[in-house]
Image (cartoon, rainbow, N blue to C red):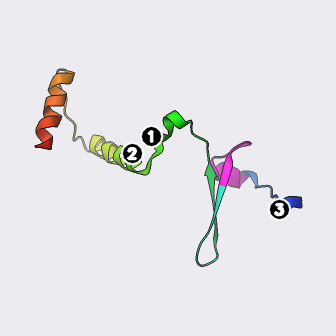
Amino acid sequence: MRRKNQITLPREVAEALHIREGDEVEFDITDSGQVLLRGMIAVSADQAWFWDRDWQQGEREAGEQITAGRTEEFEDAESMFDALENEKR
């Protein structure tokens, strides 16, 4: 440990966290006293919506549906939107 409580992460840890110089990290201390370290990468404000927890859940669900072959093709955008509207009903 260095002055001002600074530490140097071993290369393997930085690689496992997918972080590099200039990235941030986040520490959490659990109720049992374990310290969890997460790599944090800054995201542009106009892209933050994509990383929202709900949006990411939707991305995972969509990926699972695509993998399972549960997709539908449409001739044009209008027919796609019509199908979406009918699904709501």
Q: In which quadrant of the rendered image does the C terminus lie?
A: top left
Type of amino acid at the residue the image marks with label 3: Asn
Q: Which residues are magenta?
A: 12-25
**Residue that badge 3 annotates:** 5
**Residue that badge 2 annotates:** 55
Q: Residues within 10 Å of mark 3 (few under 14, many from 20)?
A: few
Disc number for residue 50: 1
Name the residue located 26 percent from the left edge and 45 percent from the top edge: 68
Residue 23, percent from left and from top? 68, 44
* Relative to 49, 70 lies left or right: left
Name the residue located 76 percent from the left edge and 55 percent from the top edge: 10
Q: Is residue 88 magenta?
A: no
Alpha-carbon distance for marks 2 and 3? 37 Å
* Relative to 68, 1 lies left or right: right
User: Looking at the rendering, which quadrant does residue 31 occupy?
Assistant: bottom right
Q: Is residue 17 magenta?
A: yes
> Is residue 24 positioned above or below 73 on the image?
below
Type of amino acid at the residue the image marks with label 1: Phe
